[in-house]
Structure formats: structure tokens, C-alpha cells
Amino acid sequence: MAREDDKVEAMEIDGEHQQAATTAVLDGFNADYLRIYYGKLFPYGDFFKWLSYGNDGKHPGCDQSYVGRREFSFTLENDIYLRFQSFDSVAEMESSIKEKCPFKIDIGPVYSVDPAKRHAYAQSGNNVFVPVERELIFDIDISDYDDVRYCCSGADVCMDCWPLMTIAIKILDASLRDDFGFNHILWVYSGRRGVHCWVCDSRARRLNNEQRAAIADYFRVYKGGENTMKKVSLTGAVLHPFLARSYTDVLKGFFEDKLLISQQLFASEERYQKIIDLIPDENVASELHDKWQGNRRSSISKEDANATRWEQLKSTLQSGKHKVLRRCIEEIVFSYTYPRLDMEVSKHMNHLLKAPFCIHPKTGRVCVPIDPDNCDDFDPMTVPTLSQLLGELNAADLHTDSENGHHFCNHC
């Protein structure tokens, strides 16, 4: 007869039948879990090597002070915030993280002097303490798309709306490589509702604020606020080559093949009215509205209604008498699909950004890298959580060291 604890799904570990109750860790996020993560799993060596950019060796070209001039900030339990942390070695960084157990780690710029000793230079009055290097960074949150997604809102996300983040990765990654010639680009899942981009080329790290702002503005198409009807304005006789490429290669197909159906954009009057409002000609807008209102009781399925009404809108705007409105089709697609950047994050060298491999305190998920070449396959719902990782540690400990019972469990 099955025991009560056998209700927990069993595990198979190297062919041995183990009960998940033995190794499972209760879902959640707390300092005890985090200490084990920092003690056993955080990739200190690779993390430090990345931010050293070759300056952690013995060769004559190394700037031995480089890493020690990088700012880190820690957010501790109870929202205690420590800025201007710095470390001269991976051992020093590892020791500090294990000791302080930060709930969040942010990475800032490399300064002209050690940020932890900045007060010693304050008396000179020569503006000695200034940022001199910082990755070009981008921050994109799904919550900024709330006006075009109907499945979720705020920090919530699902696989019907997450592809908007995938599209952002595709658009920005291609342009950063093809238009700007950058090669060393790291994409990271934020742990909850978005993605972060780190452009790590030495040329990118040395950009000043004006140059960063110019690059950010290059990507700026979506300019509307919450109360702005028209959020995208595509000017000029023809689209800029970058925008034309984005539209043809990525945005148009995504809008018509996926977003149209997944978000049911024409399924109700409230939803299609938001699209009609983007048409500047009131007569055309009224014509479409009346047509769709008139056949709302038709036998067309909701899926067919989305595709049918979109084709009707395109046909109307592309007709000979409305040639001036043809650009409106592209503007609608851009309004619903184009990346929405947090511009301020990209413009300033001293802006901090959450470090890869942190654990998001709200979801417990690891901020893992995303391969831009396979970003279509990335599912944020399958990203490991802190408790899942600790459960796997338990399973490994049971398998290799079961005789002394050294493992973390719910009853410890």
C-alpha cells in the first residue's frame, strides 16, 4: 500500500528510484537558500573573468587596477542598499558575496579610481572620480507592452506575450552587429519580465554619454506615452534601411502570423478600435469601424475575424484613393511589435544594471543568458528556480554522499 509521502512524484537518479520528498526543496526565496546558491553554484570565476576583459593576468599589457575600479552594488535583505563596492580579485569578490548574501547584485561602470575609496579623492576638486568605461546596455520590460497584450499585464508573462521579447532580441542584436559592427553581445533574462543586453566590445565600453544617447536614439521609434494615441511616426518617403529590414525580415511576419491571433487584436470592438485610432483619416477609420460593427454577429470565428479584418484594413489603406495612408500599415505593425527600450538605461555610463546569474527575489528564477541565435526556443517558464537548483543539489548529494546524509532538505 502506498505511503503518504509516496504522493510526491518519484525521481530517477542514475537508474536508482529515489523519492522526490527526500530531495525536494519548498518553493520560495530566502537568505538560507541564497547562501547555498552563493556557496555552491554562483560562477565566480567566469563572472570575474568576464568583467576583467583580460586585465586579470600577468602579461605586461594588463591594467592591474582595472577590475578594482569597477562598481558593484548589493541590495541586502530588508532593502539595505550598498553602493560603490569594489574587488581586486575573484577571491575577494567571492568572500564578500558569501558574507553579505546580497538579494540582488548590480553592476556599474569602471571609474577613474577605486569607487570604494572615492572620498579620498573628493578633496582634490579636480573631478577625479568619473566613469571611464561601461558596457553599452539595453533594458526591455514586457510591462511596457501592456497596451498591446491582452493575456497578461504588469510583471506577469506567458508564452503568448513573451515572443515580444524574442522580437526585441532579434531586432537589436542584428542591428548592433550589422549596423554598428559590435561582436561581443550578451543577452540575459531579467528573471521575471524582460531582457537585458550587454554590448561588451572595447569600443562600446568607451562610448561617452552623448554617443550612447545617439545609439539609443537610433533605435527609438516607439515614442508614445500612455495617453498618446499615435505612438509611432515613420517619416520620410521611404523607410530607413534598418527599419525596412526589421519590418520585412521580422516584424511583419510576426504580427500577421502570431501576434494577431495570440492577442486576438481584432476580436472585440474595444481592441480593434485601438488599431483604428492609429489611422489619421477619420473617414477611413469610420468606414472600417462601421463595417466591422455591422458584421459582428456573422459566423466568422474569432481567429478568422482577426485575419479577415486585418486584410480588410490593409486592402482599404492600400487602395488607390488612399495612397497617402499606405505607411499607416507599417506604423500599426511597428506600434504593436517594435522594441520598447528604457532609453535612460542606455544613455548614461553610471547607470547600474542587474548582474547575470542573480536570483530574482519575486520569481526565484536565475537570470540566465539567452542565445540570440536560438531565442525562439527560450521559455522563461522553464528557467531554473532557486528551489529547483537546491533540489538537484540534494539529489546529487544523496547519490554521491548518501552514507553521511550531508544534504539540504526541508527539515534542516
Image (cartoon, grey):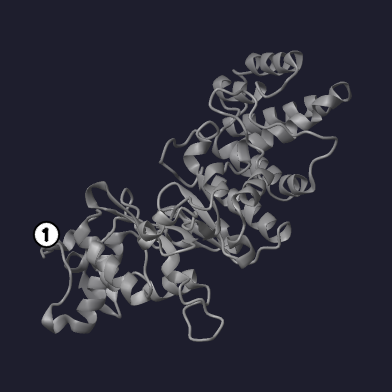
Outermost residue on the bottom side: it is 59
The percent position of residue 160, horizontal first and vertical second, equals 51, 43
User: Viewer-proximal residue, 355 or 80?
Assistant: 80
Q: In the figure, is residue 312 to the left or right of 77?
A: right
Residue on which disc 1 sits: 4
Label 1 Cα neighbours within 10 Å, binned few <14 / some 14-19 / many ≥20: few
Question: In the figure, residue 389 lies in which quadrant?
Answer: bottom left
Residue 8 seen from this side: no
Q: Residue at x 52, y 47 (%)?
A: 345
Q: Position of residue 351 (x, y in %)?
A: 48, 50
Q: As shown in the figure, which amino acid type bears the numbered disc 1?
A: Glu
Q: What is the quadrant of residue 391 in the picture?
A: bottom left
Q: On the rendered structure, is 289 left or right of 407? A: right
On screen, residue 374 versus residue 234, left or right, reads left
Q: Position of residue 23 (x, y in %)?
A: 20, 68
Quadrant of the drawing holding the N terminus: bottom left
Residue 37, quarter of the rendered image: bottom left
Q: Position of residue 118 (x, y in %)?
A: 39, 58
Q: Secondary structure at mark 1?
A: helix
